[in-house]
Image (tube, coloured by chain):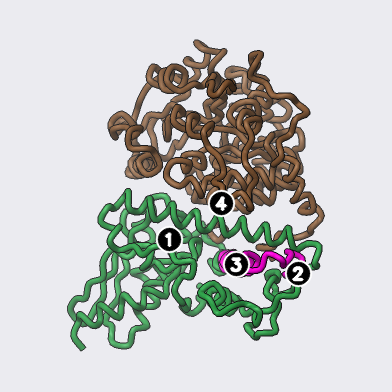
Amino acid sequence: MYSKDGENYFIVDAHIALWDARPENQLNIHGKQFIDCFYDYHRNLSPESEVWPYEEYLYYGGQRLMKDLFVDGYVDHAIFQPARLGAFYRNGFGQTEEAFALARQHPDKLTYNHCWDPRYEERGLDQLRRDADRFQLKGAKLYTAEWHGDSRGYKLDDPWSYRYLEMAQELGIKNIHVHKGPTIRPLDLDAFDVADVDKAATDFPELNFVVEHCGLPRLEDFCWIATQEPNVHAGLAVAIPFIHTRPRYFAQIIGELLYWLDENRIQFSSDYALWTPRWLIERFVDFQIPENMQDEYPPITVEQKKKILGLNAAAMYGIPVPAGAEVAATAPGPAASEAAGPAGAASVAAQPTEE
Amino acid sequence: MPTGALEQRAREALDAVLDPELDEPITDLGFVRSVETGPDRGLTVHLRLPTSFCSPNFAYLMASDAKDVLAALPDAGPVTVLLDDHHDSDLINRGLAADAGYRGTFGAEAEESLEELRLVFRLKAHAAAMERALTALLRQDPARTEEELHDVVLGDLPDTAATRALLRRREALGLGTAPSEPVLVDDDGRPFPPDEIPLRLRFARAIRVSIDGNAHFCRGLLRTRYPESAADQSPRATDPRPATLPKEKTS
């Protein structure tokens, strides 16, 4: 719980990882390239005081995770969203056993989501059934740019993807976290395009689709589909650290999200250990749309911040919220009422950037 | 002509190569790591990107466009373009050396061409340029309503960098540039019905925010990855320099 100026914020960090990218776990050069890319993101967007040494960044272990999130970081509950990256790391990137053991040890603090890859076809479906039972899955993380044999990506509307989503629905795995990456088949298309999420969200109305880093680098495409699909949500991973280096850009991102979606469909995530949650939460609570931008974007209310920082994800995952941290259900902020703006989007037939 | 002049002209030629996602020349972004002239007036150009995991299709587009503009220099010898430190460096560099084209480079991962991808991003660049020009107009004249933008034609826009940028984006798409042409149009150049205008303008703004944001992030990541690249970057102009794309390829 984070408290400031008499307000209590219940914090759910909806996207964290426990990874191992040490050289002994790297299968090839891509394992190094991948973690180096993460480390550059970390160095580029973190305040200088929060930058980790490279060695620690490769692997930090459960103990440090618990401290960074729950002792230093104000987080009340966090959700593992593992990426397997089996083509880059011997024992995978996300450490399944270690993370799951930690979640079992601290069930009040940690939820373990697992991942699947539809390209394992029938065999993977059996595995998913076993995983759902073993991990008691409420959600899953799908990295669509995972490399697998000679395929370097898949789409959510592929036939096998649909088989997996059907089974997820059947098994009660309701929350699908979608993480788009740079590769897809064929390479003719934009790998970051979220049109496949649009289709899946329409065809699986009982599932929630949380698009990680709110579709960045295609914020606009994400906003367009999220306006039309009530079961599409925005995860703030990668977007929120801009609050430090480029607060005006962050104001634009959050302003666009609040306009196109609404305050109930945006979730805080630190993307730990890409970034640590403490400074992100402090900055976000202190954040306001700069005054000279308020003609474009209305100010953010305390209520909206509470929902984004924890209440939205708590509602999605059924995480109990202590008394004193809730918000009145019938009190939408001023921005929420203005967010009625894009209502017409649903009736406009074609997306302007598409043929 | 001395090779120093050739190197200079090679750099100028590379100004015409755009990062399609960011709608900016690769030279301004600092993606050109080095340009060297060798024996027989040969040219060797190294490119670098903000991460090893930048999308391989865009990486290939920029590298192959670079090779095309350099090969088109009348007095240049053999041209070598090398993409450094990317997860597909080997694949792309082999493809470029063999002039294998998109499909020849990526094999089964490639279906037809990257022209549709290029078009999607030209359309985005146009929408963003349209929003910049129209938002400037609204700021200048607060009495004007968004719905009234329906009647604004190119001739109503002031002669600014933003307007010139819009004209170039229209040209790249084959849209008319006559002063009587309406400004706020869809991808095919048709004006939107007046009641859709606030939404369409708003969406164009989301596109502009996205492209500008990505451009700043990519610049920053490149400097983090290659600190020496800072000296090669020009600040993002709201009006990227005029650029003519190389001739379309069908391979």
Give the quarter of the figure containing the N terminus of chain B: bottom left
Indicate the position of residue A185 as horizontal and vertical percent values.
55, 53
Labels 2 and 3: the sequence-earlier one: 3
The kind of residue on which mark 1 rests is: Ala
Query: Crowding at label 4, few (<14), some or many (≥20) Cα neighbours within 10 Å?
Result: few
| Disc 2/disc 3 C-alpha distance (Å) | 14 Å
Eye-nearest disc, 2 or 4: 4
Residue at 58 percent across and 29 percent down: it is A309
Image marks 2 and 4: residues in contact by CB distance under 8 Å = no
Vertical placement of residue A55 versus A234, above or below: above
Labels 2 and 1: the sequence-earlier one: 1
State the residue position of label 2.
Answer: B148
Vertical placement of residue A199 versus B113, above or below: above
Q: Main secondary structure of the magenta part?
A: helix
Labels 3 and 1: the sequence-earlier one: 1
The kind of residue on which mark 2 rests is: Glu
| Residue range highlighted in magenta | B120-149
Output the chain of dot 1: B
| Disc 2/disc 1 C-alpha distance (Å) | 41 Å
Eye-nearest disc, 4 or 3: 4
Report helix, strand or loop for mark 1.
Answer: helix
Q: Nearer the viewer, residue B241 or A117?
A: B241
State the residue position of label 4.
Answer: A292
Report helix, strand or loop for mark 2.
Answer: helix
State the residue position of label 1.
Answer: B59
Query: Crowding at label 3, few (<14), some or many (≥20) Cα neighbours within 10 Å?
Result: some
The kind of residue on which mark 4 rests is: Asn
State the residue position of label 3.
Answer: B136
The kind of residue on which mark 3 rests is: Ala
| Residue B69 shown left or right of residue A174 in the figure | left
Q: Colour of chain B?
A: green
Indicate the position of residue A4 as horizontal and vertical percent values.
53, 23
